[in-house]
Image (cartoon, rainbow, N blue to C red):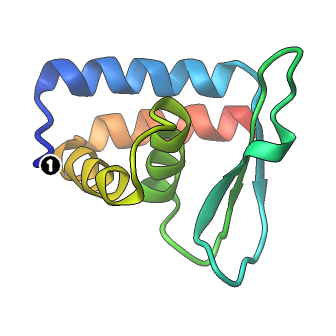
Amino acid sequence: MTMTVDAGYLKHFTSHLYRFFEEGHILKFSKMRKYVGKIDWYEIDSVDGTATVVLDHRYDILPTIIHEFLHYKYPEWPEKDISEMEKAIVSKLSSRRVKNIIKKFADAL
């Protein structure tokens, strides 16, 4: 599947990402052996729907945040499609959007 990201999708995606940060999901940093990041689906609270996202701080945080959010948004997608979409989104981000994502992420910590 070829992933293309236009301005409309990017706006839609970032607004959903910001909402994800505001919903109170748990964001953690941890050194991991096999992963750069992961959503801990076993810790999704069935009452309020919060998920735990774990990021390994030794790697690129921004692409990892986007990657893990894509898993949350599209749980049925295979890893290959998630990775392709992550790369397509990251390549289209303006420096202003990057700054805003990092600010929202920091506020959610």
Of residue 23 and residue 75, the one placed in the foreground of this image is 75
Q: Residue at x 30, y 36 (%)?
A: 96
Q: Residue at x 71, y 33 (%)?
A: 108
Q: x, y percentage for residue 31? A: 75, 77
Quadrant of the frame with the C terminus: top right
Q: x, y percentage for residue 52? A: 77, 43
Of residue 11 and residue 4, the one placed in the foreground of this image is 4
Which amino acid, by three-letter code, is at mark 1? Answer: Met
In the depicted structure, whether residue 17 falls above or below residue 80:
above
Q: Residue at x 27, y 44 (%)?
A: 95
Instruction: Kindly identify which residue carries mark 1.
Output: 1
Of residue 38 and residue 94, the one placed in the foreground of this image is 38
Residue 53 horizontal side relative to residue 60, left or right? right
Q: x, y percentage for residue 36? A: 58, 71
Residue 28 horizontal side relative to residue 7, left or right? right
Q: Based on the displayed image, in which of its 4 quarters is residue 87 positioned?
A: bottom left
In the depicted structure, whether residue 24 falls above or below residue 59:
above
Q: x, y percentage for residue 16? A: 46, 20
Q: How many numbered marks appear?
A: 1
Point out the residue furthest to the bottom here.
33
Q: Secondary structure at mark 1?
A: loop
Residue 90 horizontal side relative to residue 50, left or right? left
Q: Residue at x 45, y 34 (%)?
A: 74
Residue 83 horizontal side relative to residue 57, left or right? left
Give the crowd class for mark 1: few <14, some 14-19, many >=20 residues within 10 Å: few
Of residue 66 and residue 81, the one placed in the foreground of this image is 81
